[in-house]
Amino acid sequence: MQISEVAKEFDLTPDTLRYYEREGLIGPISKGKNGIRNYTDDDIKRIQFVKCMRAAGLEINFLKRYLQLFEGGDKTIKERREILVEQRKILKEKLDAMQEAYDRLNYKIELYDKNILDKNLM
Amino acid sequence: MQISEVAKEFDLTPDTLRYYEREGLIGPISKGKNGIRNYTDDDIKRIQFVKCMRAAGLEINFLKRYLQLFEGGDKTIKERREILVEQRKILKEKLDAMQEAYDRLNYKIELYDKNILDKNLM
DNA sequence: ATATCACTTAGAGTTTACTTCAAGTCAATA
DNA sequence: TATTGACTTGAAGTAAACTCTAAGTGATAT
């Protein structure tokens, strides 16, 4: 699969895919002798994972580190688990904060709908 | 209330509070004749709102716009409601993406716990 | 009285995550 | 054969949201 197809599939740009590779989040992707990248199924799976985690706001640095550990083989399993747990915690806190903001927005919109807004800032 | 107290209360830095004010997310905050800011209860309420929304990732620009509309008085009610609804939608999409990533992290950690990791990338 | 400390300003610098640019290669099509 | 279009590279540029610096003021503690 070529870069533009992968980009389209995941709604990323080719530039972003090359950037992720440069940063070590994916790949290195193997290339034909013309130098053109050819993405394998495993590459695609990883991109899917990266896309999901990035959409949730996990940092490039974490994903980079995770791939490095992965390359390191079985002896990194413990550390890999640890950073997953750490990231889950961070994510949970963000989720809660966002839920709170969501509820608050809902409440505010309700007030607008009921026409009971007065001079309340907030 | 002085800037450092407010900063401590909301776990922000004084720099951030001045920055928010400069950008028009809050204030302008009234100052004593020595030029020192004195935050009122209404200021605090607004900061609480801004903090909540920022923690959820809503953009500075939205908050700025919302304050501008607020200053505009009752004739802006319709537009205010509209942008709240728009932001709620954006927030909902992020929440869903994050929930998905959270579930995925949970699942992965479970696999690590059960020692069934093989060579699976992802 | 002098030093310390919190505050003030305008403006420059930083971080994260892309995004764009310039210059070039290669295969295919008019 | 010439041009079009997708790809390549390294490097510079950008946007958002802070964060820090330098230079200065003014109240309080020694």
Image (tube, coloured by chain):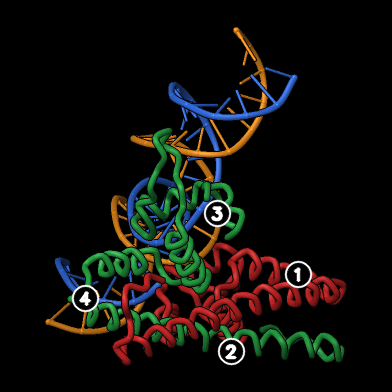
Chain colours: A red, B green, C orange, D blue
Residue sitting nearer the eye, B68 or D16: B68
Task: Give the number of the mark in front: 1 or 4.
Answer: 4
Chain letter of mark 2 equals: B
Chain letter of mark 4 equals: B
| Residue at figure coordinates x 40%, y 68% from the top left | B59
Mark 4: which amino acid? Asp
Image quadrant in which you'd find residue A2: bottom left
| Residue at figure coordinates x 43%, y 33% from the top left | B34
| Residue at figure coordinates x 56%, y 80% from the top left | A47
Residue placed under numbered mark 3 in the picture? B6
Q: What element carries label 4?
A: helix
| Residue at figure coordinates x 17%, y 76% from the top left | B75
Q: How far apart are marks 2 and 3 (CA)?
A: 35 Å
Packing grade of label 1 (10 A; few <14, some 14-19, many >=20) is some
Q: Position of residue A29 (x, y in %)?
A: 57, 73
Residue A69, numbered circle: 1
Q: How far apart are marks 3 and 1 (CA)?
A: 42 Å
Residue sitting nearer the eye, A24 or A108: A108
Residue B100, numbered circle: 2
Q: Is mark 3 on a helix, strand or loop?
A: helix
Q: Distance between the residues labelled 4 and 2?
A: 40 Å
Mark 2: which amino acid? Glu
Chain letter of mark 3 equals: B
Task: Give the number of the mark in front: 4 or 2.
Answer: 4
Q: Distance between the residues labelled 3 and 4?
A: 30 Å
